Image (tube, rainbow, N blue to C red):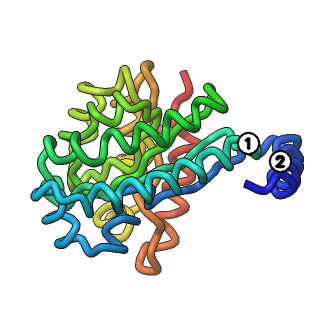
Amino acid sequence: MDEADVAGQLARNNELKKQDKVVCGNMQCTVWETAWYMRGMEVLMMDMMAEDEMADFVLDKVTELAVQRAEYFMKTGAEVLYLGDDVGMQRTVMMSRDLYQTWLKPRLKKVVDAARAINPDVIIFYHSCGFIEPFIEDLIQVGIDVLNPVQPECMDFREIHEKYGSRISFHGTIGTQTTMPFGTPQEVRAQVFRNLDIAGPKGGLLVAPTHLLEPEVPWENIKAYIQACRDYPKS
């Protein structure tokens, strides 16, 4: 890690903080996705199932690089670290919980621990599309603070918040497969209010569309989302 580069980026980030901006280090595709992009998902899955040393080699190397990125972000003053690997599909997880706990959970923990060793107060975001309810407990255990996006097409936010909301926060929950592109402005507004009501006094929700808004999302729905966030009762 080049000390001059770290010093220069730290200075730039400190200037951003003076403007009341939050500095976020974005390193999604942290371990799993990077590894299977290199090896191929089917092949890497077979390596893991067979306990082949190739799985250890690839995943360990990717984790080592992820740790280096996390440490760089912390040394340059990032206040938020955005991790992520898609481990869910529309209706189920990509792998068993045993497989996840054996191969991915300890490596993700190494990345989180490396960041917190430098900045104990960093807020750790984690992104995964799809249904990942079986892994949420594991994500809490490794130190994730905020889970994104809780797609309503895949998981029920009320159930997730009731079960885990005292130990982890959430970002997202407004569907970009359903409500944002195909709902009315009134339905968008109702969804924002509903999810904020679910969070209630306990809080723990940054209500937002679950993904980037695609061109088919009506402008009226975008304005309705913004206005609903402004109008929601604060008391």
The quarter of the picture where residue 36 lies is bottom left
The quarter of the picture where residue 192 lies is top left
Q: Look at mark 2 in the image and give the residue it sits on.
A: 10
Q: Is residue 182 left or right of residue 196?
A: left
Q: Quadrant of the N terminus?
A: bottom right
Q: Residue at x 45, y 29 (%)?
A: 204
Q: Residues within 10 Å of mark 1 (few under 14, many from 20)?
A: some
> Residue 68 at what x, y percent from top left?
59, 51
Q: Residue at x 26, y 51 (%)?
A: 152
Q: Secondary structure at mark 1?
A: helix
> Residue 224 at what x, y percent from top left?
50, 57
Dot 2 amino acid type: Leu
Q: Is residue 123 above or below residue 190?
A: above
Q: Quadrant of the C terminus?
A: top right
Is the Cβ of the residue at disc 2 closer than 8 Å to that at disc 1?
yes
Q: Residue at x 56, y 27 (%)?
A: 234
> Residue 43 at what x, y percent from top left?
19, 72
